[in-house]
Amino acid sequence: MQLTEGNKSLDNIPDLVWKSAELARQFLHSADYLRLPSPRDIFEYQIMVDVCKHQTNDAIRIQPFDSITGKGTCQRFKGMLHHLRMHDEWHSWKAQHLKAVAMDWCREHGIEHAD
């Protein structure tokens, strides 16, 4: 069911919700706003692969690859990070990736940004 003024048969919905829905509709259909990158644009699995590829210690490099296949990948990977005490490295890689996504988005939309 769509939340629109024409569908206001749901009398128990407060006016604030209708106003918010209308504002969201205007926002989504306006050329004045740009869509920010979504979680689909921020492919966390690729960050996990990159972390694994860039390990210099073979024992550490192979173990993460074993943890990033199949169902439950993220949980196993994060458990492996905890076991190997690699949280700081993971957060650093992820921050670099997110920064690259943001900078690409800014360039794509002609927005100046600071490195």
Image (tube, rainbow, N blue to C red):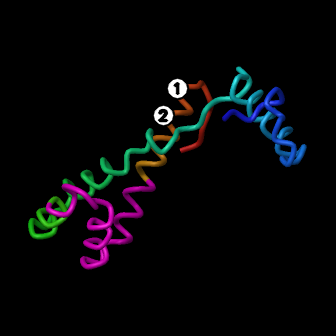
Q: Nearer the viewer, residue 52 or 73?
A: 73
- Label 2 crowd bin: few (<14), some (14–19), many (20+), radius 10 Å: some
Is 86 one of the magenta-colored residues? Answer: yes
Quarter of the image for the N terminus: give it.
top right
Residue at x-position 41% and y-position 63%: 91
Rendered image quadrant of residue 26:
top right
Q: Nearer the viewer, residue 102 or 3?
A: 3
Residue identifier under label 1: 108
Is 82 one of the magenta-colored residues? Answer: yes
* Residue 45, position as x, y percentages in the image: 31, 50
Q: Residue furthest right?
A: 15
- Label 1 crowd bin: few (<14), some (14–19), many (20+), radius 10 Å: few
Are the residues tagged 1 and 2 within 8 Å (C-beta)? yes
* Residue 92, position as x, y percentages in the image: 40, 61
Tell me the magenta residue range: 66-95
Residue identifier under label 2: 104
Residue at x-position 69% and y-position 29%: 28
Q: What element does badge 1 sit on?
A: helix
